[in-house]
Amino acid sequence: MGKYTKVRRLGAILLSMIAILTLAACGNESPTSTPVTVPATATTAAMPTQAALEATATTALAGITPSTSALQGTVKVGIMLPLTGSQAEVGSDEKRGYDMAIQDINGKGGISGAQIEAVYEDTKGDPTTSAQAAQRLISEEKVVAILGEYSSSTTAATYGVCKQAQQLCMLVGGSSISLDTDFGGSPWYWHLSPYGTYYATTAKAFFQSLSPAPTSIAIVYEDTLYGSSLSNALKDALADSDIKVVSFESFTAGSSDYSSLLTKVQQTNPDILFINSFPQDTIALWTQAKQLNFAPKMMIGTAGVSFPGFQTTLGKDANFAADIEVWVPSVSYTGTKDWVARFNTAYGKDPTYWAPISYINLEAFAKAVSAAGSLDQAKIEAELGKVKYD
């Protein structure tokens, strides 16, 4: 049984992390993705299990049982996403997940009779824009809750505004553990993304499962809250292992030329190149590494390899690239196939995990409001910790 629990427990492990090995086929065929389940080594009390995202398909929102108190009118939520800019591919998939959830919830009568009304804000992946959008949603739109987000930097900006207003905030983005340090413990704070420490321990377990085992790794990361937090977590996790960190280099996100960085890293001859960046930079780094004939035994990333753009851009050059994901469409959980098929029919593509995590985000909110029978924030917060998935 999965449970939508509070603060650090909420985002601890939605699923056992999955390393996605993206191996190019022969000739001109596209790469394929093969899920390899790697048990996470870190544990936290009452952590959610595989049931959390599996529930996107199996519950079909049947669990949103109307309370005895009918709600009137609409339930307005603010949803903040990077719909334009370099992170738009992720934001667009998040929106598809939210749109599906809204359609399903409202199609089944809404939340205790009230329809969900979503006010979308485009953050452009910019922290200042996120803060301004959050302020507008709170002061002008009077939303019941703020959902969404993607990067750690924009997520932190939104949480900062919500902290001042004590606004219910349930975000799916941000893997930096500093989010929990800065905002955790407050009743308004809910977080649905696994922290970088879990990505790090999962990557370590995956590396140690390989045969022959790698002995060296180069870590390159974007100089953002997300990049530095996760990369330092991985470096710390590997400190007591037989895998030596031979290079640890940061770069400015959105750069066009990474040749100097890659040449420096190439000289250390690592078995593994670990790229910690968002999809656009992951594609650019791996493309330029190939141009330099930099061929480590494996490249592994935290974002981008499983995105269609990576595989279509690199083709068979994507061979020996891997990714760490929370969920992939090929998982065999009960009902997932039907949910993915619905998504594919609606949007003409398979979902990235940002679609189901967004679906679950809104579904959990709807369950809590229904159980509370009220739009009173304290009552909704109390019910959020009780939301379960069978």
Image (tube, rainbow, N blue to C red):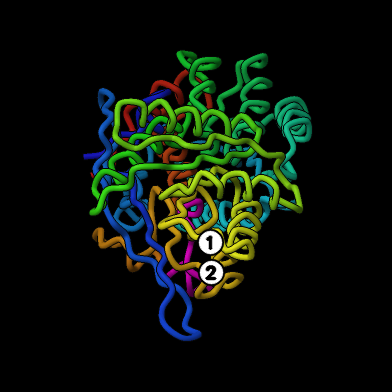
Please say if 340 is above or below 375.
below
* Direction front: furthest residue: 267
x and y, in percent, of residue 301 in the image: 49, 49
Q: Which residue is drawn at 78% across and 35% down?
A: 129
Residue 103 in sight: no
Disc 2 element: helix
Q: What residue type is labelled 2?
A: Gln
Q: Is residue 306 left or right of residue 145?
A: left
Instruction: Answer few, some or many: residues within 10 Å of disc 1's Cα (few below 14, many 20 plus, some between 14 and 19).
Output: some
Asked if the magenta segment contains residue 136, the reply would be no
Q: Quadrant of residue 99?
A: bottom right
x and y, in percent, of residue 179 in the image: 54, 23
The mark lying in front, picked from 1 and 2, is 2
Point out the image quarter for the C terminus: top left
Q: What stretch is highlighted in magenta?
A: 341-355
Q: Is residue 155 left or right of residue 177?
A: right
In the image, 2 versus 13, the foreground residue is 13
Badge 1 is on which residue?
307
Magenta residues, dominant SS class: helix
Instruction: Answer few, some or many: residues within 10 Å of disc 2's Cα (few below 14, many 20 plus, some between 14 and 19).
Output: many
Point out the image quarter for the N terminus: top left
Badge 2 is on which residue?
311
Please say if 103 is above or below 314.
above
x and y, in percent, of residue 228 in the image: 57, 30
Task: Count every numbered label the image shows and give the total.
Answer: 2
Q: Residue at x 23, y 54 (%)?
A: 211
